[in-house]
Amino acid sequence: MRASISAPFIDTNADDLVWTLEHPLVDPLATRTVQVSGVTVELRVLGASHQVVLGAGTGALVETVACLPGVPGGLPGNAEHPLPGVGDYRFDSVVESLSRTDLARRVEGIQQETSDSPGGLIVAFPGDPLAVTALHLTSGSGVSLFWRTWHAYPQSGELVTTTTTLTP
């Protein structure tokens, strides 16, 4: 699903991003709710990047990758957490520096992967067609859940890709 918005993006480069499982929900610019393996998953694009929410209420898992005021930036290359009552959670991230041509090629591929997928959500921010945030949820092997996100920063030539696996 491709969503159109009028709000500018807030984060400015990959170094500003923070990963956390403890941030409260932020009002999204666009959402998509998907049912996978009996679990409700909400994909949320924020002005400051993304949240993925599994479940509801106090037991919900909320993955946030965003610029958070007052919190120093920096994404871990990877992180693993056993989450009692939820499962084993693994997060990986990579930041690539790309030429504008290579970034355009990658963004086109991301758009093709996510636009028509039942688990995809992509938002292009005004001002530059390469300024996108995209999320793609698929089922993993067996009962695992798997999602990827992309955050493209054309002003700095960066593409941030995150990959998360949750195994109940």
Image: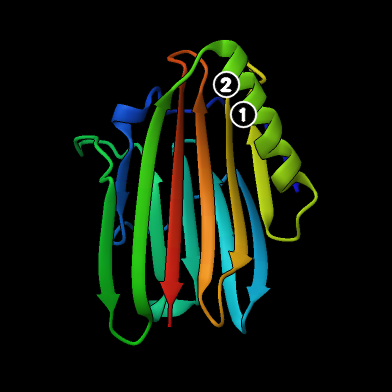
The residue located at (24%, 37%) in the rendering is 74
Name the quadrant containing residue 123.
top right
| Residue receiving disc 2 | 103
Looking at numbered disc 2 in the image, what kind of residue is underneath it? Leu
Of residue 29 and residue 144, the one placed in the foreground of this image is 144
Q: Is residue 41 above or below residue 103?
A: below
Measured as percent of width and height from the top left, residue 48 is found at: 44, 36
Colouring scheme applied when the structure was drawn: rainbow
Residue 108 location (% of width, % of height): 70, 29
Q: Residue shown at 34%/76% (left/top)?
A: 88
Q: Is residue 4 visible?
A: no
Which residue is located at x 52 percent, y 12 percent?
Answer: 99
Badge 2 marks a residue whose secondary structure is helix
The residue indicated by pointer 1 is 106
Q: Is 32 positioned to the left or the right of 164 in the image?
A: right
Residue occupying image coordinates x 68% and y 60% = 119
The answer to whether the residues at label 1 and label 2 have Cβ atoms under 8 Å apart is yes
Quadrant for residue 58, please give it.
Answer: bottom left
Residue 164 coordinates in the image, percent (x, y): 44, 59
The CA span between labels 1 and 2 is 5 Å
